[in-house]
Image (cartoon, rainbow, N blue to C red):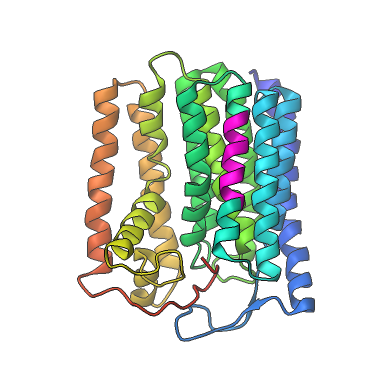
Amino acid sequence: MDRLDWIHALPWLAAAAALGAAGAWLARAHALRHGLLDLPGERRSHQVPTPRGGGVGIAVAWVLACVLSGWSGWMPWELALAAGCGSLLVAVAGYIDDHRPLSAWWRLLAHVVAGLVLAAGVSFAGGAAWLALLAFVAVPVMVNVWNFMDGIDGIATSQAALAAAGIAALGIASHGEEGVRAALPALLLCAACLGFLPFNFPRARIFLGDVGSGTLGIALAVLVVLLLSDAAPGQGAGLLVLACLPLSAFLVDATLTLGGRIVSREQWWTAHVGHAYQRLARRTGSHVPVAFAYAGWTAVAVLAALAASGSGFIVKLAVCAGFVAAGILVWRASTGADARTHEETPDDDQPE
């Protein structure tokens, strides 16, 4: 893709940012009018009633990005259609939950169906069976990881923006000109996140809501699948390893915390305050340094992925393993040796 094509893409990126911002502004007015507020509480970080559901603009921007990507050839049309339909399903389930709480199992059912839809799109687009299976698993995993990790101001949106930009850069580094085309949907997601972020950071005037966090999760799953679908024979495993690096901050924290709750025989699907980022926010007394710390980790992880993109599989695996090992140590230091709380109370941004 030449320079003129990038210039033609700029209005679409600006439109995605505008949708992210407009959605947050309109959702805030709607939430205040209808009393859709997350109230302060003993186990919540915010100090004033805060509207929720502000990620609806991101959801609209991403679904339209899927449509545009299929129409423009940035994604195979079968994959674009499946991504758009699956994302719409996740977003609608989240929007309903933001207005009238749904059972966690109904939401999980929507996420699993969305994964099946994306897997079908991969298959119809000619993707390998392993990639379709990955798509099926990645959707409910990523949707719930982003929901679990959306608990302090700015963290979920900033991490999604950085991860999307990292996947875009990784696509360009790995696929050359074809990678530029694959990168544009990622940049559209990044732009939508940047449009929303001023409403949520450094002080949240509105929260993403399930409609926003769910959309970010499935969008990132789609981007990883798109990155791998363009891989040359024998390149897929290495790219999958590197694709984990921009997501590693959230994946490590969510996996270790969830694993600990399962081992402790807690109701792992209910809300809690045991994530590393939650503990760090309580210790520092502010969300801002924690969000910046996670952003710094992800920025370094992206740079490491790009540096390793031209290396062999063993080097890529070693880099990823190093980040996972470091993440485990940081998580352990952040959470400390104290017992996890057994009180099942809501998080400050999202009901998990």
The answer to whether 315 is drawn above or below residue 156 in the figure is above
Residue furthest to the bottom in view is 42
- The residue nearer to you, when weighing 127 against 36, is 127
**141 drawn magenta:** no
Q: Is residue 281 left or right of residue 78?
A: left
Provide residue 177's location: percent of width, then percent of height.
56, 17
User: What residue range appears in magenta?
Assistant: 110-120
Provide residue 154's location: percent of width, then percent of height.
53, 62
Provide residue 76's location: percent of width, then percent of height.
66, 23
The answer to whether 274 is drawn above or below residue 320 in the figure is below
Helix, strand or loop: magenta stretch: helix
* Residue sitting at x 32%, y 65%: 261
Q: Is residue 292 left or right of residue 65?
A: left
Q: Image quadrant of residue 21?
A: bottom right
* Residue sitting at x 50%, y 62%: 150
* Residue sitting at x 43%, y 53%: 295
Q: Image quadrant of residue 85?
A: top right
- The residue nearer to you, when weighing 15 against 108, is 108
**Residue 53 visible in the displayed image:** no
Q: Is residue 220 left or right of residue 314?
A: right
On the rendered image, what quadrant is the N terminus found in? Answer: top right
**Residue 143 visible in the displayed image:** yes
